[in-house]
Image (cartoon, rainbow, N blue to C red):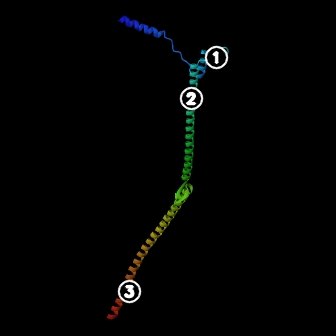
């Protein structure tokens, strides 16, 4: 049994090693026409072509033409789709460009009290207003401090005057009391005498 198996394997290996490589045939139309020309028989100056070979070649040519037409049709469809896509992209680009231009214009303007004002004018007006408010604040601070100094001086003068007035009043009361005593002493002297 081993011998039969060995013999069978040797035959298969030998047949595989001596097998011919398959021929790669060219199935292009030109090659088919050349093959038809070579395999057709000659009669005087004419070539005689068999009907089956002719019909096979005709069918192959028609199939090749149909395939080429399908490829052309597919390419045309693809080209049409690409043109439509390109058109849509162009429209989207124009729309985006218009939106960008509008956004840039909006970016240069701002709304102030319901009016559209350029940002530079708005910024300039705002900083002018801030500067005017700061200057006004500094003016009022200066006026307040100078008036505060004047009022403090007036209050100190008032205190000095109050103090002097109190001194004067005390002195005048003392004088008046001395005069009354002197007058009373004189009245008492006059009564006693």
Residue shown at 52%/57% (left/top)? 111
Q: Which residue is denoted by mark 1 in the rendering? A: 47
Q: Which of marks 3 and 1 is nearer the N terminus?
A: 1
Residue 74 pos. (x, y %): 55, 33
Answer with the quarter of the image where residue 181 lies: bottom left
Q: Which of marks 1 and 2 is nearer the N terminus?
A: 1
Asked if 85 appears above or below 12 in the picture, the reply is below
Residue shown at 57%/22% (left/top)? 55
Q: Nearer the viewer, residue 21 or 58?
A: 58
Say which of marks 1 and 2 sits in front.
1
Q: Which of 165 and 140 is in front in this view?
A: 140
Q: Which residue is denoted by mark 2 in the rendering? A: 66
Residue 51 at least partly seen: yes
Q: Compute the Cα span from label 3 to label 1.
A: 177 Å
Marks 3 and 1 in Cβ contact (< 8 Å): no
Q: Nearer the viewer, residue 108 or 100?
A: 100
Answer with the quarter of the image where residue 49 lies: top right
Q: Which residue is denoted by mark 3 in the rendering? A: 179
Asked if 128 appears above or below 161 in the picture, the reply is above
Quadrant for the C terminus, please: bottom left
Say which of marks 3 and 2 sits in front.
2
Tag 3 secondary structure:
helix
Marks 1 and 2 in Cβ contact (< 8 Å): no
Residue 193 at least partly seen: no
């Amino acid at each position: 049994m081993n011998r039969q198996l060995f013999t069978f394997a040797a035959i298969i290996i030998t047949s595989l090693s001596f097998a011919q490589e398959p021929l790669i045939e060219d199935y292009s139309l030109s090659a088919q026409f050349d093959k038809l020309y070579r395999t057709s028989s000659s009669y005087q100056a004419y070539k005689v072509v068999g009907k089956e070979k002719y019909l096979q070649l005709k069918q192959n040519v028609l199939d090749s033409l149909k395939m080429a037409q399908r490829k052309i049709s597919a390419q045309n469809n693809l080209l049409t789709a690409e043109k439509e896509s390109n058109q849509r992209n162009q429209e989207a680009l124009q729309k985006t460009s218009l939106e960008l231009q509008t956004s840039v214009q909006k970016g240069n303007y701002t709304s102030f009290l319901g009016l559209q004002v350029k940002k530079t004018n708005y910024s300039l007006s705002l900083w002018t207003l801030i500067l005017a408010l700061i200057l006004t604040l500094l003016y009022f601070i200066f006026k307040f401090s100078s008036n505060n100094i004047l009022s403090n001086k007036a209050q100190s003068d008032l205190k000095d005057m109050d103090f002097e007035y109190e001194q004067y009043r005390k002195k005048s009361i003392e004088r008046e009391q001395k005069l009354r005593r002197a007058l009373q002493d004189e009245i008492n002297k006059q009564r006693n005498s």
